[in-house]
Image (spheres, helix red, strand yellow):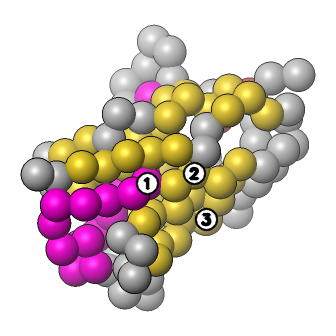
Amino acid sequence: QVQLVESGGGLVQPGGSLRLSCAASGFMFSTYVMRWYRQAPGKERELVASINSGSSWTNYADSVKGRFAISRDNAKNTLYLQMNSLKPEDTAVYYCKWAEYWGQGTQVTVSS
């Protein structure tokens, strides 16, 4: 069965960095677009970043452009999100998504 398992979240000070990982299994990871979403308290889930199968195309929400970088390792069936220059408004649960499947999410809290 399809499994998406996120990790790497935590508490970080403003201006800090985190790298999220999403370990995928149960489907041909290397052939599909993958996406990161996030959901802040009281807000709708929003698309953060997308990447195509060969990593030749990426796309970002305006709010994270220049600060976040999505990448993937198809040999390891793993999706990444490098988050730099974090701001308090980046606080959210971050999810990876494939088709209609979601991971359980990983909490990112940016606070001093």
Q: Does the magenta stretch include residue 30?
A: yes
Q: Report which residue position mark 2 lands on.
A: 20
Q: In 3D space, how far apart are the residues under numbered discs 1 and 2 (Cα atoms)?
A: 7 Å
Instruction: State whether residue 87 is above or below residue 1.
Output: above
Is disc 1 surrounded by few (<14), some (14 to 19) or many (20+) residues within 10 Å? many
Question: Residues in magenta?
Answer: 22-39
Q: In the image, residue 88 lies at what x, y percent? A: 74, 28
Is disc 3 surrounded by few (<14), some (14 to 19) or many (20+) residues within 10 Å? some
Q: Report which residue position mark 1 lands on.
A: 22
Image-quadrant location for residue 79 = bottom left
Q: In 3D space, how far apart are the residues under numbered discs 2 and 3 (Cα atoms)?
A: 10 Å
Instruction: State whether residue 72 is above or below residue 43.
Output: below
Label 2 residue SS: strand
Is disc 2 surrounded by few (<14), some (14 to 19) or many (20+) residues within 10 Å? many
The answer to whether 89 appears left or right of 102 in the picture is right
Write the residue at 25% across / 60% down.
25
Q: Report which residue position mark 3 lands on.
A: 69
Q: In the image, residue 26 lies at what x, y percent? A: 16, 61
Instruction: State whether residue 47 is above or below residue 12.
Output: below
